[in-house]
């Protein structure tokens, strides 16, 4: 149950904002207001103003401020509920636990998003207000089934629809503002809907909860796409569009297809291409890259064919390659985006493109740089150095050889000339960029991330510990750390590295610290743990082996080849004994 609005108003009206703020910073009287140095950013000239008359505060520099609750939440980094409890206590107002808790603030934000998402979807699918947007989406090739499955909606052309819906559900304006659903007038601090007359695309976190929206303008107003601002639950550095739905397909195919537009992602997804993930901006965060690295070995970029898409391909492709991912590019012709290509060339043509037209990132870059340096010898030389630098990050010998041949042919150079540039640059790059990973194999990275997930959450450790053996953790170091965790969690509920390392041999100290320093999402699901266990134990690979052997066995039976049938049956028995289900 949320805090009653009457309680909130009682506390707000009886708490003087000048008294509250003056407990945190020095204030000086300036006319009708008070001013001081802003507590939320560094400054030399006071820009933080407090209005006793309006009972609000505001920084003209960083724009932070608000009423008594908002100030206390910001400066103490506490929840709205906690701010009401703290300010209510000296007034004799006791906020009981069953009043103040809606599970927690994160879940409160999620419940708000789930509620308004249902309303937006109903408006799109079942009202006259939504007919224009619905017709637009259907004309673009989005079926009713897809719109229902993805819960696409419409924020109506009303400035207070969301606000009223939130209040009727028992939430507060302040909480809805903190959740990113409302905006605030910085003059009088009144609240209004952030999303108006926009197609609403829900954004889910890795646990499949709706935590925000991408909102597309319906009437041509700018910006064309408006996202939820950064909140406690909507942090772009931790999010990727459609990841919760794509994860299993990504694991199976060992490939992520990365795209820009969220509607493009949904359009491609409707073609039963499941391993599609969308960017949450124009760049990838370290957390995004860490997540991609844990999910797959291969990333294919399919950005828009215009200039901005090409620039994003260059920048993001280089970043992914340098972080150890096999990076490929699918180029769309004529400056088109995926949706436009599907509409103009058809679904089968698009499927063919996805299946057969993947070029390594360095191949893509070599062609782009060659076109740009056709009449510039200085740029030509610099581009050769750029390409050979990047070749040092290609771990697959066959692909590296093919790329060297391509560059030598297209740039009119001997293969040996390209190869002669590699050795020195290889050692320089490996030392400067990958020193923190110690040239770890893909399997070692996965084992480390698996251990990190267990360290972060004892419940996941208990869930998986009986299935962990030497086939899952093949390294003596990693298996030794796991056995140490078994002893540690016998007596401890939470992991602290300073306590844990006392129980381990000295040679494991550095490894444990490196694992503990890994960047990993705070909450890993049981499904993800199951994926790790299947992947590391070899069950996924054994399933692929079985499929191939069964296909060959059918061919041998058709050819009546008894010897080959016996040989294939023996191989199947060996796989079954190696990986018992």
Image: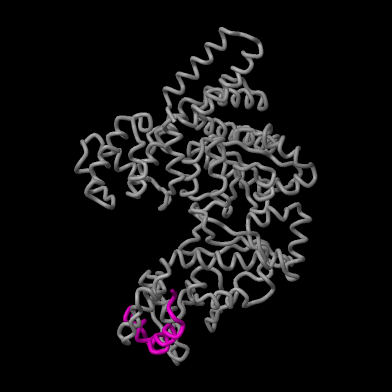
**Residue 132 drawn at (x, y percent):** 77, 65
Q: Residue at x 47, y 25 (%)?
A: 423
Whether 206 is drawn above or below 172: the answer is above
Whether 54 is drawn above or below 330: the answer is below
Q: Is residue 493 left or right of residue 272?
A: left
Q: Residue at x 67, y 53 (%)?
A: 263
Q: Residue 404 occupies which quadrant of the picture?
A: top right
In this picture, which residue range is highlighted in magenta? 1-29
Whether 534 is drawn above or below 58: the answer is above
Q: Foreground: 290 or 153?
A: 153
**Residue 341 drawn at (x, y percent):** 75, 45
Q: Quadrant of the N terminus?
A: bottom left
In this view of the protein, can residue 428 be seen by the observer? no
Q: Foreground: 47 or 288?
A: 288
**Residue 25 drawn at (x, y percent):** 34, 79
Whether 91 is drawn above or below 550: the answer is below
The mark total stands at 0
Q: Foreground: 399 or 32?
A: 399
Outermost residue, left side: 502
Whether the magenta-drawn stretch holds residue 15 is answered as yes
**Residue 12 drawn at (x, y percent):** 42, 85
Q: Residue 407 occupies which quadrant of the picture?
A: top right
Whether the magenta-drawn stretch holds residue 103 is answered as no
In this view of the protein, can residue 447 be seen by the observer? yes
Q: Quadrant of the C terminus?
A: top left
Colour pattern:
one colour
Q: Is residue 194 left or right of residue 345?
A: left
Q: Residue at x 66, y 23 (%)?
A: 409
Q: Is residue 339 left or right of residue 38?
A: right
């Amino acid at each position: 149950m949320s805090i009653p609005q009457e309680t909130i108003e009682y506390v707000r009206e009886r708490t003087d904002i000048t008294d509250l703020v003056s407990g945190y910073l020095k204030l000086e009287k300036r006319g009708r207001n008070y001013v001081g140095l802003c507590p939320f950013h560094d400054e030399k000239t006071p820009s933080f103003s407090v209005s006793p008359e309006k009972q609000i505060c505001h920084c003209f520099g960083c724009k932070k401020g608000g009423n008594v609750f908002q100030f206390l939440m910001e400066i103490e980094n506490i929840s709205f509920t906690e701010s009401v409890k703290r300010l209510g206590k000296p007034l004799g107002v006791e906020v009981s636990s069953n009043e103040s808790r809606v599970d927690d603030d994160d879940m409160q934000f999620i419940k708000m998003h789930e509620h308004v998402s249902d309303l937006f979807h109903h408006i799109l699918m079942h009202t006259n207000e939504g007919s224009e947007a619905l017709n637009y989406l259907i004309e673009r090739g989005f079926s009713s089934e897809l719109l229902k499955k993805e819960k696409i909606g419409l924020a109506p052309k009303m400035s207070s629809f969301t606000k009223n819906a939130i209040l009727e559900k028992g939430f507060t304006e302040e909480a809805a503002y903190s959740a990113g659903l409302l905006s605030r007038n910085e003059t009088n601090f009144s609240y209004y809907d952030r999303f108006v007359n926009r197609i609403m695309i829900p954004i889910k976190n890795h646990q499949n909860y709706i935590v925000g929206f991408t909102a597309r303008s319906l009437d041509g107003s700018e910006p064309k796409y408006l996202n939820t601002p950064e909140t406690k639950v909507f942090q772009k550095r931790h999010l990727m569009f459609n990841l919760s739905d794509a994860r299993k397909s990504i694991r199976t195919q060992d490939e992520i297809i990365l795209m820009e537009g969220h509607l493009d992602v949904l359009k491609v997804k409707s073609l039963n291409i499941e391993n599609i993930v969308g960017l949450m901006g124009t760049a990838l965060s370290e957390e995004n890259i860490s997540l991609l690295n844990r999910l797959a070995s291969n990333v294919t970029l399919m950005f828009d064919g215009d200039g901005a898409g090409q620039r994003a391909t260059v920048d993001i492709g280089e970043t992914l390659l340098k972080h150890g991912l096999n990076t490929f590019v699918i180029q769309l012709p004529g400056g088109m985006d995926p949706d436009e290509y599907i509409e103009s060339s058809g679904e089968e043509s698009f499927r063919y493109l996805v299946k057969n037209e993947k070029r390594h990132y360095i191949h893509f870059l070599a062609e782009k740089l060659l076109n740009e340096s056709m009449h510039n010898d200085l740029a030509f030389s610099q581009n050769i150095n750029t390409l050979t630098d990047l070749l040092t990050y290609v771990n697959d010998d066959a692909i590296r050889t093919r790329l060297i041949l391509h560059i030598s042919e297209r740039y009119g150079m001997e293969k040996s000339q390209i190869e002669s540039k590699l050795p020195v640059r290889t050692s320089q790059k490996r030392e400067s960029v990958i020193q923190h990973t110690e040239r770890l194999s893909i399997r070692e990275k996965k084992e480390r991330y698996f251990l990190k997930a267990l360290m972060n959450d004892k419940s996941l450790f208990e869930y998986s510990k009986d299935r962990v053996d030497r086939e899952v953790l093949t390294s003596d170091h990693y298996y030794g750390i796991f056995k140490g965790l078994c002893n540690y969690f016998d007596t401890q509920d939470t992991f602290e590295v300073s306590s844990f390392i006392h129980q381990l041999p000295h040679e494991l100290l550095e490894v444990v610290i490196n694992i503990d320093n890994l960047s990993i999402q705070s909450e890993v699901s049981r499904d993800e743990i199951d994926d790790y266990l299947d992947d590391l134990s070899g069950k996924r690979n054994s399933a692929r082996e079985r499929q191939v052997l069964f296909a060959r066995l059918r061919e041998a039976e058709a050819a009546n080849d008894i010897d080959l049938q016996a040989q294939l049956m023996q191989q199947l028995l060996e796989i079954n004994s190696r990986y018992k289900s």
